[in-house]
Amino acid sequence: MPELPEVEHVKRGIKPFATGQKIESVIFSEKVKEGKASQRETIIKGMALDTFQKFTEQYVIKEIERRSKYIVFHLEKGEEERILISHLGMAGGFFVVDKIEDISVPNYRKHWHVIFKLDNDKLLVYSDIRRFGEIRNVPDFEAYPSFLEIAPEPFEEEAKGHYIAWFDKKTYQNKPIKQMILDHRVISGCGNIYACEALFRAGIHPARLSKSLNNQERDILFYYVRDVLESGIKYGGTSISDYRHADGSTGTMQQHLNVYKQKVCKVCGNDIETQVIATRNSHYCPTCQK
């Protein structure tokens, strides 16, 4: 699943080509149409397809930003404003091309689901191999309440204090620390890969109960969450399976991982072990992490 660094690079890839452009038309794949016809919310969530087109076509993309693992498009038509909120799910991605055939990765070329035809003759294409992603069109963020619960961006000054305050809540005191930092209400944008890596760098076992961490460990863990997310951005994200940049290229963060899908610990040489925590497969070193 694309996490904060991957989504950041997708945003950076599409922003120069789509910002300031009018959306002339929106085209849906047959899978999206079939899903809606059978009462399933396939990609387009929360409204009918024709309603989505009504509140998207002829709107200008005024700004594109990333919030946690979401890409947010601010739209404007005259005095009317709308917001597109998109989550890439397990294997979604946006591409800017002249035609569908220009998408360089065959699976993404085959599994396109929404095309936004822009007035600069470019196509902003949402592709999703597994169709777990979503795009919502809302009048404001209040119309999507769960979005408002997202923690501050981890690079913002208030993020650490926000995270620390969660240790005083009952929600996660008797649950694994790995589960806690995966919650975007606690830390924004930290998914499974980067949680595994941050816990390794901090020397903390992912299954430890949150309440067992002392103040120093809490501080160190947040430092390394932010540190590994910054590394992910620096190296263009982690391309282990499906993730691609908007131009089809791959990131290289996978070359800098210490535990996630690794066989041997690079520090002590012992075998990396796995354990399912909060339905996610956690990778850790039983020697270096306590």
Image: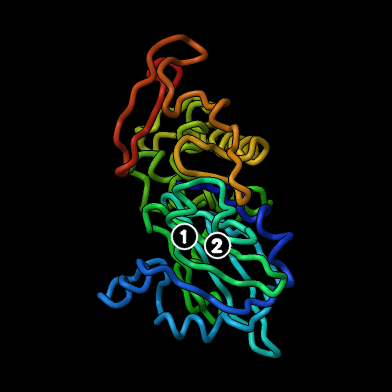
Residue 136 numbered tag? none
Tell which circle, 2 or 1, labels the residue nearer the N-terminal end: 1
Q: Residues within 10 Å of mark 1 (few under 14, many from 20)?
A: many
Q: Secondary structure at mark 1?
A: strand
| Other residues around mark 2 within 10 Å, as few (<14) / some (14–19) / many (≥20) | many
Q: Is residue 165 visible?
A: yes
Residue drawn at x 32%, y 75% as measured from the top left: 36
Q: Quadrant of the C terminus?
A: top left
> In the figure, is residue 35 to the left or right of 180?
left
| Residue found at the very far top of the displayed protein | 269
Residue 91 picture location, percent across and down: 44, 50
Q: Secondary structure at mark 2?
A: strand
Say left or right for 231 vs 41: right
Amino acid type, mark 2: Val
Q: Relative to 242, is 137 above or below?
A: below
Q: Residue at x 52, y 86 (%)?
A: 54
Three-letter amino acid code of the residue under disc 1: Trp
Q: Residue furthest bottom?
A: 79
Location of residue 56 (image quadrant)? bottom right
Q: Which residue bears the numbered disc 1?
A: 112
Coordinates of residue 120 in the picture (x, y in percent): 72, 70
The reply to whether callout 2 and callout 1 are in contact (CB within 8 Å) is yes
Residue 125 is tagged as 2
Whole-percent x and y of residue 254? 53, 30
The answer to which of 57 and 200 lies nearer the viewer is: 57
Q: Residue at x 48, y 80 (%)?
A: 52
Q: Quadrant of residue 99?
A: bottom right
Residue occupying image coordinates x 67% and y 86%: 77
Q: Is residue 130 above or below residue 86?
A: above
From mark 2 to mark 1, how far is it between C-alphas? Answer: 7 Å
Query: Vertically, is 187 above or below 272?
Result: below
